[in-house]
Amino acid sequence: MTDTSTHLPVPVTPPAPHDNFASEEAIKRLDKRRAAERRFRFYGQAAIGVGIGALVILVYAILSQAVGAFSRHSLSFDLQLDIATIVPAGDTRDSEAIASNVSGFNQLIQASLLDSFPEAADDRLVRRDLYGLITRLAVLPVARSVAQNPEYLGTRQPFSLALSDDLDLYLKGAITKRRWIDAGVPGRLGLSETGQYVLSDAGTTEFPILRALWEVPEDNRPGLIIRLGETWFSLNELSGASAIM
């Protein structure tokens, strides 16, 4: 027996699209959400950019202010290395004695400064400021160099010495033009009728210094600060032997 039945194809109906995704309202909501995501990404990138910019400015400010700490002003001149001053014992082979003779090298440097500025020889205050250009320990590199090269003894050699800390900072613009005087323990310190302090006795050493500085023209005169014990005063006027602060 033969099966003559015919199998007809069954039509397949595609699924109907979901109403929520097919509607215009759903598409609008999707567009709004995508726009919100784009704004969120933009705000995040902008915040990161602002943070990086602020960090760059901060690093630049720190480096620009700290660059002065990596440099230092120095004074260069030729120094006559006198054997009798550097090696009083006469043993030029004693490198340890040469390297440790800080006083001898300071004497040579002070003599060289006086040769360069002979006008300071007769003025104690000017001579004191001249010697203060270079600190006592600034000669250590010179002493070590001569100790390592004893053939320098008795000759004139070029050297560069670091300036004092105060002068170095002043040249860098880090401090103002001021001068302070240590008057020691307060002497006769009183209060005037106008409410100003009056120091009538600062000792025999400080008053000549104050007088000399006060006589400098006002345009070039440094601000004068007087230290009495642990207290600091700004000098306003000198009247006779009294300092008005």
Image (cartoon, rainbow, N blue to C red):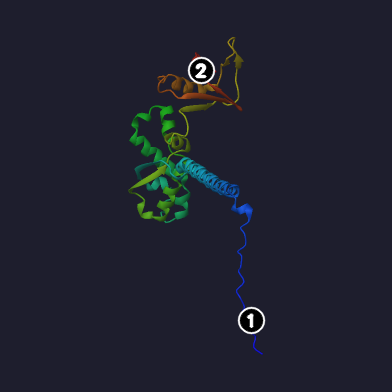
Residue occupying the far top of the picture? 193
- Report the residue at 63% width, 56% height from top: 18
19 displayed left or right of 73: right
Residue 113 picture location, percent across and down: 37, 37
Q: Which residue is mark 2?
A: 236
Quadrant holding the C terminus: top right
Please tell me in which quadrant of the rendered image residue 218 appears: top left
Give the amino acid type for the residue marked by disc 1 in the picture: Ser
What is the distance, in whole Å, between disc 1 and disc 2 at their CAs?
A: 128 Å
Tell me if 200 is positioned left or right of 119 in this view.
right
Q: Residues within 10 Å of mark 2 (few under 14, many from 20)?
A: some
Q: Which residue is mark 1?
A: 5
Query: Camera-side residue: 219 or 155?
Result: 219
Residue 162 seen anywhere in this rendered image of the structure:
yes
What is the secondary structure assignment of the residue under circle 1?
A: loop
- Could you say where residue 172 lies in the image, as x and y percent from the top left? 43, 36
